[in-house]
Image (cartoon, grey):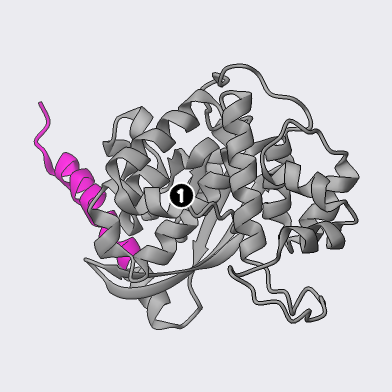
């Protein structure tokens, strides 16, 4: 990652684990009568499916300093049955564009005023804006009420994955905390190739050091990009509800993603969300009323 040797280790680990997750029967390989000592495909089978020699693929999986062509990388991705996120991660790990000797330092991300106005306009639905490494760049009022107020953290600590693993709140909030936490790991894994910046590497190091679950799931080297899905919550104010989410990408900024959470019309979850919206308005309303009732000076 930060150097060529670390990059080779990451590449070798990903290839081995991806090969171990493949189903030989689904790959269409004929049974040869040999007992498989470990799950998944053998190296020679991956090579066969990718149209490469066993020796060539073996050297790739050993992390040798080989730069395959994009066509070979694509063939290996197909042989390993990688989804689009897995193939993107593989391309990143092969580092066809070349890496720098040291982690990059990227500019601080900011949310433009128009996007903040959009968040405020979607007042009835929770919205989160995430940047690199799942940094929380912005959220609207009801998202604060549904999840947490990320602005209570110092700016460098406003990160969704960090909150998921190092705060007690998410473990009580998410009914399926493990599934949600694993998703955070897999998304961060996708971003942590050779091009990862210094802040991403520092976040990974902190989470590995402070969270046993994060370290264990990180070492599984699974990647996935979730563009939609659902979350089941047990909210301390409105009780159980399920929210569906869709992600919106900004064409002019691929490192910013807008997450919009909705509930099924007429459902108990919708009623819970409406109640939460009313509840979250209460402090602001009381504050305004208090100000209006105060005697003039």
Left or right: where 80 falls relative to 207 = right
In this rendering, the answer to whether 185 lies above or below 275 is above
Q: Point out residue 107 in the picture as x, y percentages from the top left corner.
A: 55, 20
Q: Give the left or right position of residue 141, taking residue 98 as reference.
A: left
Q: Nearer the viewer, residue 85 or 295?
A: 85
| 210 drawn magenta | no
* Main secondary structure of the magenta stretch: helix
Residue at (46% x, 38% y) in the render: 135
Q: Quadrant of residue 296?
A: top left
Residue, x 34% and y 34% (percent of image)? 157
Question: In which image quadrant can residue 65 be found?
Answer: top right
Q: Secondary structure at mark 1?
A: helix
Looking at the picture, tell me which residue is in the foreground, 85 or 249: 85
Q: Which residue is mark 1?
A: 218
Query: Total marks drawn?
Result: 1
Residue lying at the far front in this picture: please name it.
34
**What x and y, as percent, mark residue 87?**
73, 51
User: Residue 5: where, in percent of width, then height?
Assistant: 60, 28
Q: Is residue 254 left or right of residue 129?
A: right
Residue at 52 percent across and 50 percent down: it is: 121
For the residue pair 66 and 130, the one nearer the viewer reads as 66
Point 69% across, 46% down: residue: 61
Residue 148 visible in rendering: no
Instruction: Answer whether residue 278 is magenta in the image.
Output: yes
Locate residue 197, reporting x and y percent.
55, 26
The magenta span reads 276-297
Quadrant location, the C terminus: top left
How many neighbours does mark 1 have within 10 angstroms: few (below 14), some (14-19), or many (20 or more)? some
């Amino acid at each position: 990652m930060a150097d060529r040797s670390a990059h080779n280790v990451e590449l070798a680990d990903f290839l081995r684990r991806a090969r171990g997750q493949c189903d030989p029967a689904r790959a269409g390989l004929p049974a040869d009568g040999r007992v498989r000592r470990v799950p998944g495909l053998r190296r020679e089978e991956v090579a066969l499916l990718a149209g490469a020699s066993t020796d060539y693929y073996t050297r790739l999986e050993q992390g040798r300093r080989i730069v395959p062509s994009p066509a070979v990388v694509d063939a290996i991705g197909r042989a390993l049955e990688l989804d689009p996120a897995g193939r993107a991660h593989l391309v990143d790990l092969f580092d066809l564009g070349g890496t720098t000797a040291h982690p990059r330092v990227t500019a601080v991300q900011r949310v433009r005023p128009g996007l903040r106005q959009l968040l405020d306009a979607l007042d009835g639905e929770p919205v989160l804006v995430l940047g690199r490494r799942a940094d929380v760049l912005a959220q609207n009022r009801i998202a604060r009420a549904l999840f947490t107020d990320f602005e209570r953290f110092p700016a460098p600590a406003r990160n969704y994955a960090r909150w998921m693993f190092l705060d007690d709140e998410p473990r009580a909030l998410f009914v399926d905390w493990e599934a949600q936490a694993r998703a955070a790991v897999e998304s961060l894994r996708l971003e942590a190739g050779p091009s990862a910046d210094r802040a991403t590497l520092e976040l990974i190091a902190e989470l590995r050091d402070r969270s046993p679950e994060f370290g264990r799931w990180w070492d599984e080297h699974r990647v996935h990009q979730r563009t939609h899905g659902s979350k089941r919550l047990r909210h301390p104010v409105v009780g159980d509800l399920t929210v569906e989410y869709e992600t919106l990408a900004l064409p002019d900024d691929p490192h910013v993603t807008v997450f919009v959470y909705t509930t099924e019309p007429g459902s108990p979850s919708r009623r819970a969300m409406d109640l939460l919206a009313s509840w979250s308005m209460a402090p602001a309303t009381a504050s305004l009323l208090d100000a209006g009732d105060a005697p003039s000076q």
